[in-house]
Image: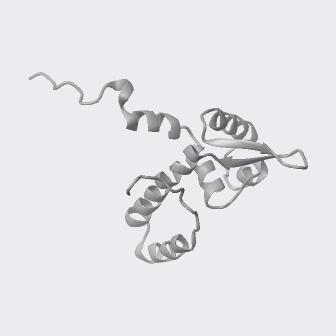
Amino acid sequence: MARPPPQLEYQADPIRATLKLFGKKWTLLIVRDIAFLKFQRFGQILANNPGLTPRVLSRRLEQMASEGLLKKVRDSEGGPRYFLTPMGEDAVYILLAMLRFGIRHYLGKQTAREEEKVLSELRYDLPKTDWNY
């Protein structure tokens, strides 16, 4: 029996395109640090992610900026700070979905209650869009 043709063209598959962008190692954790922890500095992000090397972080920040996820801004002291662009802010929805999934399916009940408390204390002002979630 022949397989049915794919329903979405390979190049037009939005899930595939999103995975290509966010499937790169460290990307979502960097977005998490900037969005939820309000980290803006290279050293803050590096210290919060054991196993992440300075070289890899430097490359990922450059790639994320060129992909339109981050904006690199030099402060008055000449040091770089990193901020999410509107595209990067849209990734917060992905993180929230992953957080909810992880709490529901991977944490014990006691830990889940503690995590739900932490989750309720997280503050991130979601960008205003015409999307309905």
On the image, the x and y values in percent for residue 65 come to 66, 37
Q: Position of residue 80 (x, y in %)?
A: 80, 45
User: Number of callouts in the render?
Assistant: 0
Q: Quadrant of the N terminus?
A: top left
What residue is shown at x 69% (from left), y 56% (from top)? 48
Q: Furthest-left residue in view?
A: 1
Q: In the picture shown, does residue 128 fall above or below 11?
A: below
Q: Nearer the viewer, residue 71 or 113?
A: 71
Q: Quadrant of the C terminus?
A: bottom left
Left or right of 26? Residue 116 is: left
Looking at the rendering, which quadrant does residue 5 occupy?
top left
Residue pictured at 60% horizontal, 34% vertical: 67
Image color mode: one colour
Q: Does 62 appear above or below 70?
A: above
**Residue 40 image offset from top left, x and y in percent:** 73, 53
Residue 72: quadrant of the picture:
top right
Given the current orientation, which residue lies at the most extreme right position?
A: 77
State the image coordinates of residue 71 (x, y, percent, origin top left). Answer: 69, 42
Q: Residue furthest front?
A: 130
Which one is nearer the viewer's eye here, 50 or 2?
Answer: 2
Residue at left offset 52%, top offset 73%: 120
When the figure is inspected, residue 60 is found, relative to residue 106, above or below; the finding is above
Q: Is residue 54 above or below residue 10?
A: below
Please indicate whether residue 52 sits to the left or right of residue 97 in the image.
Answer: right
